[in-house]
Image (spheres, rainbow, N blue to C red):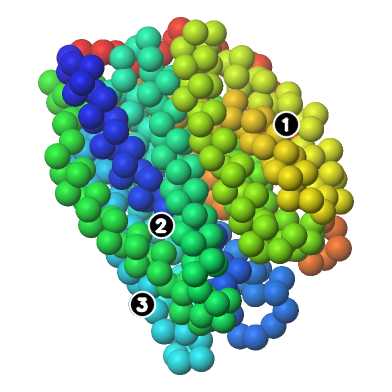
Amino acid sequence: MPGRGVRLRSILGGSAGNLVEWFDWYAYSAFALYFAPAFFPAGNRTAQLLNTAAVFAVGFLMRPVGAWAMGVYADRHGRKAALTLSVTLMCAGAFLIALCPSYRTIGWGAPAVLVFARLLQGLSVGGEYGASAVYLSEMAERSRRGFYSSFQYVTLIAGQQVALCVLLILQAWLPEAALDAWGWRIPFAIGGLLAIAVYRIRRGLIETPSFRNVQRGDGARSSGMALLRDHPREALTVMLLTAGGTLAFYAYTIYLQKFLVNTSGLTRQSATGVMAVALTLYMLLQPVAGALSDRIGRKPLMVGFGGAGVAFTIPIFLALERVRSPLAALALVCAALVIVTGYTAINAVVKAELFPAHIRTLGVALPYALANTLFGGTAEYVALWLKNAGLERGFYVYVTAMIGVSLVVYLRMADTRTTSRIVED
């Protein structure tokens, strides 16, 4: 069993890589308002955002493929090996976007390159989630597993936060015309360079005790068929508990930046500032909620998210429609993010605790990726499509309904803190 110092260094090392992965992933969304005209023909703002949101959703189509391929790879060859491969793919996608010529230069070749880059990044993130969730959960000691695994979303949110901070800096330093013309390429170049550094960090990580036990075990192997045959209930549980949580997360984070501009009427700079402050507070909440789950269990937090999400999602969005003050918008966004913390802080450890080690990464990654593709990846597109059709409030109902579906699962499942299948060496 590795000592606490080794555990801490490993968790921090894995988290640093996760931050860069999600910085690259979220830079796309944070800068979409600027680069949409570079990749698509001229049109109204909502139409161009629909196109960029569609490409964002296409990236999610590769996430189940990445989850399956790298989930099996991580279960057979190690969590460390899968984490290293995932950051390599993210690096390639980031540099492709940074260097891609515009639509004016190569026509439809520009969106084609953009789609290919997002497919690479989708493959990367599909593998990253499961490998990272399992690595953090397996490296943590039992009494602090919720706390340490919560750093997956700390770094995920930090990646989004850093992307927004880069946007704020560029908005302050560059004229808007320069941002529209070439400034939006800077964060993708930064992401590619950081990914190279993280590759070296991940090469130095140690392997988890659980995977070493698998190597000494009875030879049971991870595969999609084995998952469906031996663990169908657990896989379905992961899908359903993810559906409402991932939709709420993307609605409250990715989409809200655009909602504050297109619906609330805030400036792009004000909307970015609101989201930057809100996400900082949200990030700090994750380890607090994770530590709380180590004391009272995972189930109360998930039920709290489900109940509050059903009760308050529609009122929060209705209030945001009418908000004109950035401070009032910040308060409402923070309320939404406090609610979804009950899911995000502990979802990684809950999923990891459902499966035995030899198939744990695949069991976490593939059902999650399927639910994330269906509900998280399409959240922004559905919201913008409904807005374009004059049915914007239908999105609020949709989010509430899916949180309700997940709430039923939270109420029926056992508390994984007491039934965990993670065995420490």
Q: Residue at x 17, y 18 (%)?
A: 2
SS class, disc 2: helix
Q: Is residue 350 visible?
A: no
Amino acid on which disc 2 is placed: Asp
Identify the residue under disc 2.
24
Residue 348 numbered mark, or none: none
Rendered location of residue 343, percent (x, y): 57, 29
Say which label, 2 or 1, has the lower sequence index: 2
**Quarter-wise, where is residue 392 in the image?**
bottom right
Relative to 408, residue 116 above or below: below
Residue 99 numbered mark, or none: 3
Which quarter of the rendered picture does the C terminus lie within? Answer: top left
Q: Residue at x 42, y 72 (%)?
A: 185
Is disc 1 surrounded by few (<14), some (14 to 19) or many (20+) residues within 10 Å?
many
Q: Are marks 2 and 1 in contact (CB under 8 Å)?
A: no
Q: Is residue 57 visible?
A: yes
Relative to 128, residue 147 above or below: above
